[in-house]
Image (cartoon, rainbow, N blue to C red):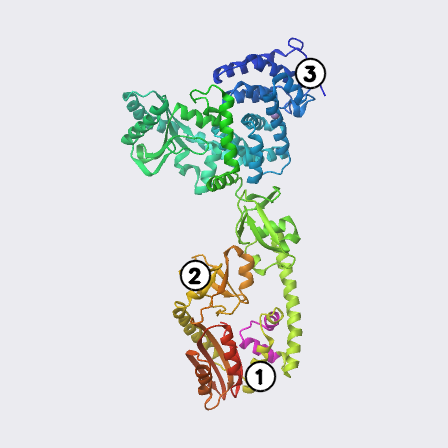
Amino acid sequence: MIQASAVPQKGEIDIDPKYRQQREDLLALCRDHLPAVDADMIRRAFRLSYWAHRNDWRESGEKYVSHPLRVASIVARDIGLDDTSVAAALLHDVVEDTELSLGLIEDEFGATMANIIDGLTKIEGVFTSQKLGQAENVRKLMLSMATDLRVILVKFADRLHNMRTIEALSRKKQLRKASETLNLFAPLAHRFGLFPIKSELEDLCFEILNPEAYAHIVERLEEMAEERDAYIAEFIDPLAEHLEEEGFTFTIKGRVKNVYSIHRKMERKNKPIDEIYDIFAIRVILQSDGPKGKEDCWRVYSLVTDLYKPLPERFRDFISVPKSNGYQSLHTTVFGPGGRRVEVQIRTQEMHEVAERGVAAHWKYKEGTENVDEEMERFLEWVRDLLENPEPEEATEFVKEFRLNLYDEEIYVFTPEGDLLTLPQGATPVDFAFKVHTEVGMQCIGAKVNGKMVPLSQELTSGDQVEIITSEKQSPSPDWINFVVTHKARSRIRKWTNEERRKAVELGKEVWAKAKDQAGLEISDQDLQGVAHDLKFPDLQQLFYEIGKGLYDPDELVESIKGTQSDGAAPDDEEVDEVALREQYEQFLDAAQQTEQQALVIDGEVQKDLAVNYASCCNPIPGDEVFGFVSKTGTVNIHRSSCRNASDLLVNQPDRILDVDWSHQKDVQFVAALRLMGEDRVGMVNDITTVISKNLKTNIRSITIDTEDGVFSGTIMLHVSDLEHLKRLIKRLKRIDGIQGVYRFKE
Ligand code: MN
């Protein structure tokens, strides 16, 4: 460690005249842009930096000290805060890169300077750890920087100079630096209101990350420059004349958007550059201060709109309601010559400086506060407060700003630990899970994006922080194949599904063999195939699969076969009847549901006004285990938990699931449908209706009976109060002479 006594004093080191000159240029910049300049402090800082870095070189081959010198120039000119930050810029790398200690800085320049340099050294560590990107981390980072605002301001200047000289780095390093800068520094600079720095950072990054798109836009801008300049002059000249007549002191010019903003606009609007109308904006800056300034802006607005017709919906008053970074201006879009839309921004010089230099400009204009530190402390308090207790809107915006849209075809998302993963556009949490690890993908049951539960099928966006929820009991759902986009996820899901299917078919065969033996049934594979077909299974495999998965009751199959065997064949017209029946049933359900809504308790509250629909795939009645699923239109669909769509909905769209209970209102009746099969005999219908209406005081809504060759099949729709009621009814019906089966109607 270097002792203070080892540092050469004034005159003891030879400074290359080239750098001596640069030091004097820097001082001149300071005098131009800063309220007060301690030239001695800046010279001492330069000398110490020059000496400390005497053996260091930039990748470009220049002496290292050229870097802190340029950084200090940026701080002086583009941020223009104070001389302490300029001196800090000169010293920003000495503790990090040389043997100089923080203690030495403190001895030479005091505690404030040491604190800034310490902050700069620590930030460097945070940025190189690659654990950033998450809003929460960024917020923490900003908090640590918020001990002295000058830390982050100098850091911006440092990064800007590094980006300006990035060609000296390898392509790989360039890409890493550029994406980090676009992801973090540019939005942060925006947050701090440093508009020119933010814009330049964006363009430098964009040029590295997407050279073709960058070159294309730059080329088109150049080609269009002449025409654009002529148009701007045509727009400005009559306006400037009016403003002069009214006695304003002002500057007015056309400003072209930065390349990256144009690119984003093209992407957003999906239009070529020639169709983007607001590539430039006209900016009027008034030399008018204080309360009169605001008034003058409105007067100018009135003059502008006298001359050019405004689009009323494109007006923003950022003067009365400044942006959170302090930005103030009036924005209006008017129809210029030839009916072209032109954005006009009107502000005072004071507002302009805030717009360009953000927070640094804030206290320059505060009257009566000579003490920069005091004013800064007040600002930092505001920053800390904002970061610690962000308004919900503020927080979302904050996260949004960290979203990047670098490439069409790729997105960048973060793990909860802040690690960056690259995924193709359109990727979903399932793709993310498989990318993290095959096991994570296989056991994925849900996902949180930016802390919120989302459907597993939701498309991810750059900047999203994704957390996968896993369960050892979970296995991939075959439906995932419909929305995953990565090869890995696709192939793993497919492999698993095929294997599962094979296992389920095997199991189904075993289960069926047992059920068949128990029932004492004999049936050939060919006949079974026929039965499967009659039961609307595409093939035997599917029948076995559904039995294996427990989706189809083998006893039901036994009943069906007994039915066909006693008869020799299934009724030919069954299909037609089923369709007619279902329509009739659904119509009835529609009508009946009007009266049924009050019986539900959703998420602990009795729901009366909610639009509720009883899913026609499973027709739940009270007593059934149910859940609610919020449809896109806001209707709550009630499904039985055993519904074959249930696992799909529960697993894939958990955030749309509601807890539903049945309330205990016995007077409410529900619709259920039963399917009955048996012998056709005289008095059968009468027996059935008697059991239903007399014994159990159940209202029959409709009854459909078909008989053919002595076989009877019927469907009864009735009102029941709950599941118990229905079960009792089924039991009674089964006792009727000649009835072979009673089933609850499923579809
Ligand atoms: Mn540096």
Q: Would you say residue 527 sits in the magenta stretch?
A: yes
Q: What residue type is labelled 2?
A: Gln
Question: Alpha carbon of mark 2 to alpha carbon of mark 3: how far?
Answer: 76 Å
Mark 2 surroundings: few (<14), some (14-19) or many (≥20) residues within 10 A: some
293 relative to 458, above or below: above
- Quadrant of the snapshot with the N terminus: top right
Residue 553 in the image: state x and y as whole percent.
59, 74
Q: Label 2's element?
A: loop
Which residue sits furthest top? 11
Residue 562: mark in rendering: 1
Residue 567 in the image: state x and y as whole percent.
54, 86
Q: Which residue is label 2 attached to?
A: 607
Quick check: which quadrant has ligand 1?
top right
Q: Would you say residue 139 sits in the magenta stretch?
A: no
300 relative to 594, above or below: above
Boundaries of the magenta span: 526-545
Mark 3 surroundings: few (<14), some (14-19) or many (≥20) residues within 10 A: some
Q: What residue type is labelled 3?
A: Ala
